Image (cartoon, rainbow, N blue to C red):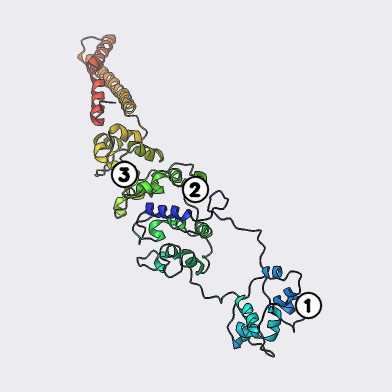
Amino acid sequence: MHSTHLALLAAALASFADANQPTASIPWLVEPENNAPALLPWLPPRPKDQGDPKSEKRMGTKAFCRQQHDEEECIKQREKPVFMKADRSKCRTGTWITEPCMGTVKWCKHADTLMEWKLPDDETAKQTAQRCITFRNPPQQPKDEWVLGSGCSKLSEACLGTDSWCVWYHDLYANQENCFLNHQPRPQGQAPFKFRNSSFFADSEFRNGTEAVCLAIRSNETRTDCFRAREKIPFQVPFAPNCPTGSRDTAMDERCLGSVAWCELQKDVYGSIASCLSLRTEQPKTKLPWQTKQASKCHGLDVEACLGTEGFCIRLNDQVKRRECFELRDTAPLLPATADTCAEERCVGTVAWCSDKWNQTGYANASECFGVRDVDPSGFMSAITETTALETEKILVAAALMRANVTMIREALKNETQDSSVWMKNGIMAGRELFQMTGKGGYWRKGIQKGIEHALEADAEL
């Protein structure tokens, strides 16, 4: 059986070699034929009905066509009658000479029927009757119900669904297509498109995905019906939120590669990249939202909704792919530190998260962590320094003015002089001394700078 997605696609490709390739944007896509004339029904003789005695309604199709210029063409325009078994419940009051009542064998042996079917070369009535009998289609047998499948874990059509059952488990039928033909028509409406999910039973649509199942169908028409019975394939950006990052087969999963790269791989199957994309929905014009971690509620699932965007993208070892994953999402928010005690960014704040925990999180350095949040670490630190320095300077000016006022009051209380200008002069000098002392050599600015550098653990490369 087909155990991997790659094997499924290889088998599908092999099946196309024997398939007819009608002219279409997708080589195997079969467009409905709207111009084909519908066949007329085959009518039994009803000589007692009202109307024109030479009409097909009263004569029956065989006798009517025999009177036409081209009997063979007239018959070709009608549906073939179906072989019938004798059924007394269908015998009409007043006469039993009808095919539903007598059954096809006796009907074809009846004198009037023999006259309609006799050819000049017929040597016996048996030969004529046999032609009448074999002309009919075989009796219609009840067809199997079409099953969508439940995804359960038993090797049965009820679990796998009819498409998967006929593709991989058609042993009870002559071949794959015979399996499809012996089922009732597909249910009306479109079923959701399914991506691969390794948690389901092998060789079902639930496990292998809709595309793998439909592509493995050999008949162009049935394969087309398979795709049309589903909703359009959702367009996937690279590293989509439902990309199973923990899977070994991420290189063969459209949710991880993205629809454009996936269709590049499948262009030989679909005829072109554009044809492949035509079966998908339109590419989203907005970025994906940034998602927070919800792992505690997801029982170990490795999708973005559980891991959060940061954990989801950071697991990609390739730096280019990791950067692309982040760029397809909204910018991560800048979070302040809170009073909550936890080791997550929502508690410690973005600055501490990127400064102290970038290595534990999986970033290459603090710069990458800040960069995901659209922050240049050097500029960020400089902005904080300048803002803090300005606020500190305001505090120092206020302190200097306060000292000046205190000094002036003290000078006045000493009563050494009544000259207020002296008090003011001494007060101003005292204020300047405080300001100059704290600003001497730029100590307070250097202190702010050093403190920020220590908090951010600035990388020497920045």
Q: Which residue ends up furthest to the bottom in the rendered image?
A: 94
Q: Is residue 274 left or right of residue 378?
A: right
Which amino acid type is shown beneath numbered disc 3?
Gly
**Residue beneath disc 1:** 54
- Image height of 328 relative to 66, above or below: above
Task: Using the rendered image of the protein, determine whether residue 333 is visible from the camera's viewpoint.
Answer: no
Task: Residue 394 in the image: state x and y as whole percent.
Answer: 31, 22
**Residue beneath disc 2:** 276
Q: CA distance from mark 1 to mark 2?
A: 56 Å
Q: Residue at x 31, y 49 (%)?
A: 246
Task: Using the rendered image of the protein, determine whether residue 16 is visible from the camera's viewpoint.
Answer: yes
Q: Nearer the viewer, mark 3 or mark 1?
A: 1
Pointer 3: residues within 10 angstroms few (<14), some, or many (20+)?
Answer: some
Q: Label for residue 311?
A: 3
Which amino acid type is shown beneath numbered disc 2?
Cys
Judging depth in this view, the residue of 59 and 326 nearest the camera is 59
Which amino acid type is shown beneath numbered disc 1?
Lys
Q: Residue at x 64, y 78 (%)?
A: 132
Pointer 2: residues within 10 angstroms few (<14), some, or many (20+)?
Answer: many
> For residue 65, what is the image quadrant?
bottom right
